[in-house]
Image (cartoon, helix red, strand yellow):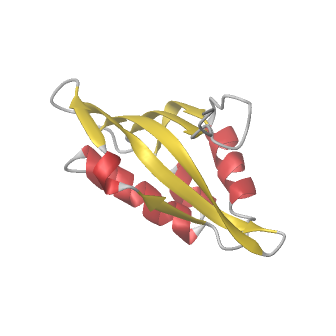
C-alpha cells in the first residue's frame, strides 16, 4: 500500500496502535527501519524487534494513542521523503487506572516505499524542573 502523504502514514500508525495488532503496526516500518521506542531503553533495528516491542505494548489494557494535531510539524526533505514531529499521548491502564504518557515523536517517512517508516524516535515529555 502506497501513501499519498506522510500524515496519512502517521494517522495509520495511530489507528493501528489503537487497534493493538503488532503485525499491522510493524508492516508500516521499512525493513531497515530504526525504532527508538518510548517505553524501552533499547534501540530496535529489526522487523522482529519492532513487532516484539509492539506485541509487548499491546498487552496493556486500554491501550490508545492520542495525537496532538496542533503540535504536528512536517518538513519535506525531497519529493517523497519527509520528517514529521510533534506530541502524542499514549494511554493505558496501570493497576486498573488509565494513565496518560505525553511523548515527543519524530518520524522519517518515505511515501515512495510500501513500508514507509524509515526512522521513528519517541520519548516521554520530561516533567518541568521549575
Relative height, residue 84 to residue 34 (above, below): below
Q: Nearer the viewer, residue 60 or 126?
A: 126
Which residue reaches farthest right?
Answer: 95
> Residue drawn at (62%, 40%), measured in percent from left and top?
127
Relative height, residue 56 to residue 121 (above, below): below
Query: Which of the 4 quarters of the picture holds residue 114?
Result: top left
> What x and y, as percent, mark residue 30?
46, 37
Report whether residue 1 is seen. no
> Residue drawn at (52%, 59%), measured in percent from left and top?
24
Report whether residue 82 is seen. yes
> What x and y, as percent, mark residue 1?
32, 54
Q: Quadrant of the C terminus?
A: top right
Query: Which of the 4 quarters of the picture holds residue 124?
Result: top right
Residue 5 as seen in the image, left or right of residue 11: left
Tell me how many marks there are.
0
Query: Which of the 4 quarters of the picture holds residue 101?
Result: bottom right
Q: Nearer the viewer, residue 68 or 83?
A: 68
Relative height, residue 40 to residue 54 (above, below): above
Residue 17 as seen in the image, left or right of residue 14: right
Which residue reaches farthest front?
Answer: 130
> What x and y, as percent, mark residue 129?
63, 32
Residue 66 as seen in the image, left or right of residue 78: right
Q: Nearer the viewer, residue 94 or 51?
A: 94
Which residue reaches farthest top?
Answer: 77
Residue 111 as seen in the image, left or right of residue 16: left
> What x and y, as percent, mark residue 66?
47, 62
> Residue drawn at (68%, 42%), measured in percent from left and top?
48
Relative height, residue 112 to residue 58 (above, below): above
> Residue drawn at (44%, 55%), measured in percent from left and top?
13
Amino acid at each position: 500500500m502506497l501513501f499519498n502523504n506522510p500524515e496519512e502514514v502517521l494517522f495509520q500508525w495511530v489507528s493501528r496502535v489503537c487497534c493493538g495488532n503488532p503485525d499491522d503496526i510493524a508492516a508500516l516500518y521499512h525493513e531497515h527501519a530504526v525504532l527508538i521506542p518510548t517505553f524501552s531503553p533499547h534501540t530496535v533495528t529489526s522487523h522482529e524487534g519492532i513487532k516484539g516491542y509492539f506485541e509487548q505494548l499491546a498487552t496493556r489494557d486500554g491501550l490508545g494513542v492520542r495525537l496532538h494535531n496542533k503540535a504536528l510539524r512536517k518538513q519535506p526533505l525531497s519529493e517523497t521523503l519527509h520528517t514529521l514531529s510533534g506530541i502524542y499521548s499514549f494511554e493505558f491502564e496501570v493497576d486498573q487506572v488509565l494513565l496518560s504518557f505525553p511523548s515527543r515523536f519524530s518520524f522519517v517517512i518515505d511515501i515512495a516505499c510500501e513500508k514507509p517508516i524509515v526512522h521513528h524516535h519517541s520519548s516521554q515529555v520530561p516533567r518541568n524542573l521549575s
